[in-house]
Image (spheres, coloured by chain):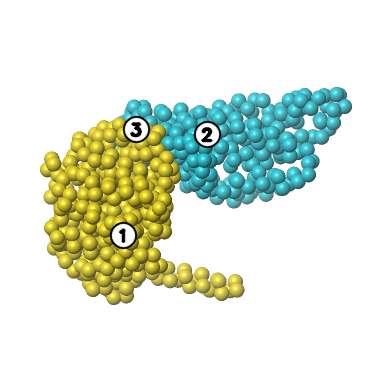
Chain colours: A yellow, B cyan
């Protein structure tokens, strides 16, 4: 047994040595530091196929959930740094601009369906969005039907409020609640401190005709309060318990049929349809109405916060290899089908294959019907600290230990201070 | 024997010394330098003088974290050592099942801080829900008490083992002589046992003081600093300074805080060591 083990170990060593020798060749190599743990395996398979086809070695490594910045920081100062990494929008770019290659003249720009998906600063393209996602209120159609409503009945905040409060009134008779728990546990409160908070920011930006700001006014914070109140008061649990509830709790409540509505995004599709929990016909995603603007024409919140950046400090050959790899991923048949079918991504490139994701299809239908998608303005939030402070104020408000004024202060005053701190 | 040591000392000393230099001295010097810089990655740092240190003293959250940590350290050190010493006394009286009790009390120490933090988070939140009180991350005093309970549960067993070793090494003729002279149990405890276990007390106080000051995992997992940074301790404050905002200046601020923190911990433990060492007796 020991002998076998020794032989195996020796073989592994030879393999890695030869791989290392190979990687040092003239062709250059690719090292992608992936952000999304759920698609780590699929990236590795795709990379292996690319290496088989072209002989260029591709290493894929994934940062554990919520530790991307930390991982990137330590990886990028190593002697074999990632050649391809990602930032999450303008605020993330501020940290990494020195390391981002100018992509203005790269082939990939021409492949984008819209120039909006390029991350630019002062006219220079530093990042390329590679996945578009949508979020809204995921609805269990069968339960909604049981309560006597259909998705078409909900066309505005007033409708949503009426339906939710009716379900709550008949909660014991129906056996389910309107909303899955608004989990405010710090690992998953991004659904509310980031995604839900996007709506008041979006409408304010629309009013002012701006795309970012150093001081938010909070014009629509009352509407933010309305929707948050609706969530926490018509939910599966007592608002005082929300600080210990996670997104996973909400997901399992939704899957178990304990709630009709669940605010989350198109990335939930694989989880919700796994093991036959739901079929495409059971699910719908409705826009998050907060009672502002033209609600009849409001679409889902659709946007991008994942931008590919190429490491400008990498070797010339590695940079070229990385650009070639990126191009192959978004143009080749194998690349595009893997991204669409196996990772469930919608990519903003001309060669994209249609995704089987029902939420994505819905987003396309809504856009085709003339509804305006709500853009992702949360990428302009001044810092992680701002989000954390808002999350903590929301949690206290939900539990009754804090008041709404604290939320307003975290939102408005916090924005100004954090913007100063981050850019001062 | 002595000749062999004279000849071979480098074999014993150099590997450890090299590891100490590579793993501690060099990173410390590098860290010291970085605390005077703005940087995103450590390979690209630009020197900016004492600005980072100037910033720290204007940062109210750092000061709050310092006082919170200091209070926590005092309370947890007292609780842990009193309880550990009491249990150690009880378990050196030849009662039945002593070994079983020792193992059971020691066991929590084998579980990692993050795991413990989450376990206690669930446990305490359940209790608070039943009592109808605000949960840990909503009410700073509960968060503080929660942290103390958690640390006691984890550390008492470890300190207990050290105290047991100390008590067992007291020569039995001291105790016998005291009993023959008619000393009461209380007198034996104060005049013989405690002076003789002073070396153990020095070590235990040192460990629980530094552990309290450096606490990170348990703090992160149990309360995460909530509500509104009120239960944020120094180590977590440094971590948040480093990662919660983008921009090169924050790495420098975090680094400067870390250097200050390191000096503080060293200073406090040196004072404590000197103070308790002076009370130790020679057997």
Residue at the extreme right of the image, as rendered: B180
Q: Which residue is drawn at 22% across and 62% down?
A: A362
Q: Are marks 3 and 2 in contact (CB under 8 Å)?
A: no
**Of the numbered discs in the image, which one, if any, rests on residue A302?**
none
Residue to which mark 3 is pinned: A403
**Residue A388 visible, this orientation:** no
Chain label for disc 3: A
* Image: A156 above or below A407: below
| Marks 3/2: CA–CA distance | 24 Å
Quarter of image, res A372: bottom left
**Quadrant in the picture for the N terminus of chain A:** bottom right
Circle 1 residues within 10 Å: few <14, some 14–19, many ≥20? few
Residue to which mark 1 is pinned: A145
Q: Is mark 2 on a helix, strand or loop?
A: helix
Camera-nearest label, 2 or 1: 1
Front residue (pair A405, A37): A405
Front residue (pair A382, A358): A358
Instruction: Locate residue A295, reporting x and y percent.
Output: 17, 49
Residue to which mark 2 is pinned: B145
Q: Do the residues labelled 3 and 1 touch (CB within 8 Å)?
A: no
Q: Which residue is drawn at 41% across and 59% down?
A: A256
Chain label for disc 1: A
Mark 3 on the same chain as mark 2: no
| Marks 2/1: CA–CA distance | 48 Å
Camera-nearest label, 3 or 1: 1
Front residue (pair B44, B103): B103
**Residue A369 visible, this orientation:** yes
Disc with the residue nearer the chain's start (3 vs 1):
1
Instruction: Locate residue B151, reporting x and y percent.
Output: 56, 39
Mark 3 on the same chain as mark 1: yes
Q: What element carries label 3?
A: loop
């Amino acid at each position: 047994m020991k002998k076998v083990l020794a032989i195996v170990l020796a073989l592994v060593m030879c393999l890695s040595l030869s791989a290392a020798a190979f990687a040092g060749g003239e062709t250059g190599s690719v090292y992608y530091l992936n952000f999304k743990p759920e698609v780590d395996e699929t990236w590795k398979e795709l990379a292996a196929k690319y290496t088989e086809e072209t002989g260029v070695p591709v290493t894929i490594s994934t940062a554990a959930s919520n530790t991307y910045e930390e991982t990137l920081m330590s990886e990028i100062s190593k002697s074999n740094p990632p050649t391809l990494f990602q930032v999450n929008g303008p605020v993330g770019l501020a940290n990494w601009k020195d390391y981002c290659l100018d992509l203005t003249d790269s082939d990939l720009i021409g492949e984008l369906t819209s120039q909006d998906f390029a991350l630019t600063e002062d006219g220079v393209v530093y990042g390329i969005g590679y996945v578009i996602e949508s979020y809204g209120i995921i609805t269990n159609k069968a339960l909604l039907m049981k309560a006597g409503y259909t998705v078409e009945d909900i066309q505005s905040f007033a409708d949503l409020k009426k339906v939710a409060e009716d379900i709550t009134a008949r909660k014991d008779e129906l056996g389910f609640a309107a909303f899955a728990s608004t989990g405010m546990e710090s690992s998953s409160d991004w659904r509310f401190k980031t995604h839900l908070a996007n709506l008041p920011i979006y409408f304010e930006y629309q009013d002012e005709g701006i795309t970012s700001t150093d001081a938010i006014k909070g014009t629509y914070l009352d509407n933010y309060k309305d929707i948050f109140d609706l969530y926490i008061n018509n939910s599966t649990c007592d608002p005082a318990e929300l600080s210990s509830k996670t997104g996973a709790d909400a997901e399992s409540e939704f899957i178990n049929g304990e709630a009709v509505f669940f605010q989350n995004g198109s990335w939930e599709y694989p989880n919700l349809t796994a093991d036959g929990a739901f079929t495409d016909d059971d699910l719908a995603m409705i826009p998050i109405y907060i009672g502002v603007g033209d609600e009849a024409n409001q679409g889902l919140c659709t946007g991008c916060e994942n931008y590919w950046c190429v490491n400008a400090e990498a070797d010339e050959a590695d940079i070229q290899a990385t650009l070639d790899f990126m191009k192959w991923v978004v143009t080749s048949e194998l690349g595009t089908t893997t991204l669409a079918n196996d990772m469930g991504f919608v990519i903003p490139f001309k060669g994209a294959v249609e995704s089987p994701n029902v939420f994505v299809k819905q987003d396309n239908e809504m856009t085709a019907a003339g509804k305006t998608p709500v853009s992702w303005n949360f990428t302009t939030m001044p810092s992680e600290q701002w989000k954390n402070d808002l999350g903590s104020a929301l949690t206290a408000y939900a539990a009754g230990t804090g008041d709404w004024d604290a939320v307003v202060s975290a939102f408005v005053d916090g924005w100004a201070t954090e913007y100063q701190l981050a850019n001062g | 024997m002595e000749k062999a040591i004279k000849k071979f000392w480098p074999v014993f000393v150099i590997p450890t010394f090299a590891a100490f230099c590579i793993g501690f001295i060099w990173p410390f010097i590098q860290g010291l330098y970085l605390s005077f810089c703005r940087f995103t990655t450590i390979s690209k740092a630009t020197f900016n003088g004492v600005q980072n240190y100037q910033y720290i003293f204007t940062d109210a959250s750092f000061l709050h974290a310092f006082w919170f940590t200091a209070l926590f350290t005092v309370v947890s050190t007292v609780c842990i050592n009193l309880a550990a010493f009491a249990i150690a006394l009880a378990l050196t009286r030849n009662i039945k099942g002593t070994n079983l009790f020792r193992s059971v009390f020691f066991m929590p120490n084998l579980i990692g801080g993050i795991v413990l933090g989450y376990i206690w988070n669930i446990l305490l939140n359940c209790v608070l829900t039943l009592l109808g009180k605000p949960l840990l991350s909503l009410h700073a005093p509960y968060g503080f008490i929660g942290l103390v309970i958690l640390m006691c549960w984890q550390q008492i067993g470890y300190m207990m083992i050290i105290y047991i070793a100390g008590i067992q090494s007291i020569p039995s003729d001291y105790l016998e002589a005291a009993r023959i002279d008619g000393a009461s149990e209380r007198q034996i405890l104060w005049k013989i046992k405690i002076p003789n276990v002073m070396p153990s007390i020095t070590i235990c106080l040192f460990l629980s003081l530094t552990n309290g000051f450096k606490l990170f995992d348990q703090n992160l997992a149990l309360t995460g600093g909530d509500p509104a940074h009120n239960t944020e301790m120094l180590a977590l404050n440094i971590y948040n300074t480093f990662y919660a905002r983008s921009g090169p200046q924050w790495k420098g601020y975090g680094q400067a805080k870390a250097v200050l923190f390191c000096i503080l911990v060293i200073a406090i433990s040196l004072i404590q060591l000197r103070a308790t060492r002076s009370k130790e007796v020679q057997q």
